[in-house]
Image (tube, grey):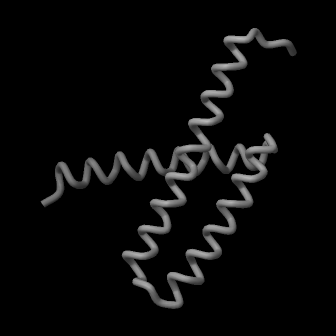
């Protein structure tokens, strides 16, 4: 199906923004692992496995594989929900 130029640009911007937030979620995930485990072997193991998974999904998402794009969107939506819950918890928490 043919897309107009402005439609192609809009899809490209949305795609790039999802990938940018996906990279942000990797950094946030590594930060949470570090605060939970310190600089021990558990952090190194979990951080390495998590980073390898994120890199593999990011690579295939750049190649526009549908399963990788699905994981990127799920991860971004989970990050948004997590941030909303954290804000609500900080606002109404005691």
Q: What is the residue that sits farthest to the right in this orientation?
A: 1
Q: Nearer the viewer, residue 5 or 79?
A: 5
Q: In this rendering, is residue 36 above or below 55?
A: below
Q: What is the residue that sits farthest to the bottom in this orientation?
A: 41
Q: Residue 69, image x and y in percent? A: 71, 44
Q: Nearer the viewer, residue 57 or 81?
A: 57
Q: Nearer the viewer, residue 42 or 5?
A: 5
Quadrant of the image containing the N terminus: top right
Give left or right: position of 83 versus 63: left
Quadrant of the image containing the C terminus: bottom left
Q: Residue 36, image x and y in percent? A: 39, 78
Q: Residue at x 63, y 20 (%)?
A: 10
Q: Nearer the viewer, residue 79 or 34?
A: 34
Give left or right: position of 33 versus 3: left
Q: Residue 11, image x and y in percent? A: 67, 24
Q: In this rendering, is residue 80 above or below 41?
A: above
Q: Residue at x 62, y 76 (%)?
A: 48
Q: Residue at x 37, y 75 (%)?
A: 35
Residue 93: quadrant of the picture: bottom left
Residue 50: quadrant of the picture: bottom right
Number of marks drawn: 0
Give left or right: position of 38 versus 91: right
Q: Residue at x 62, y 36 (%)?
A: 16
Give left or right: position of 29 versus 45: left
Q: What is the residue that sits farthest to the left in this orientation?
A: 94
Q: In this rendering, is residue 27 above or below 46?
A: above
């Amino acid at each position: 199906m043919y897309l107009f130029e402005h439609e192609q640009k809009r899809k490209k911007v949305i795609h790039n923004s999802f990938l940018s937030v996906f990279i942000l979620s990797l950094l946030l995930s590594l930060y949470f692992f570090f605060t939970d485990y310190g600089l021990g072997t558990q952090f190194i193991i979990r951080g390495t496995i998590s980073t390898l998974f994120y890199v593999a999904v990011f690579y295939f998402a750049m190649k526009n594989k549908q399963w990788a794009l699905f994981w990127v969107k799920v991860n971004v939506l989970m990050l948004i929900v997590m941030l909303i819950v954290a804000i609500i918890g900080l606002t109404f928490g005691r």
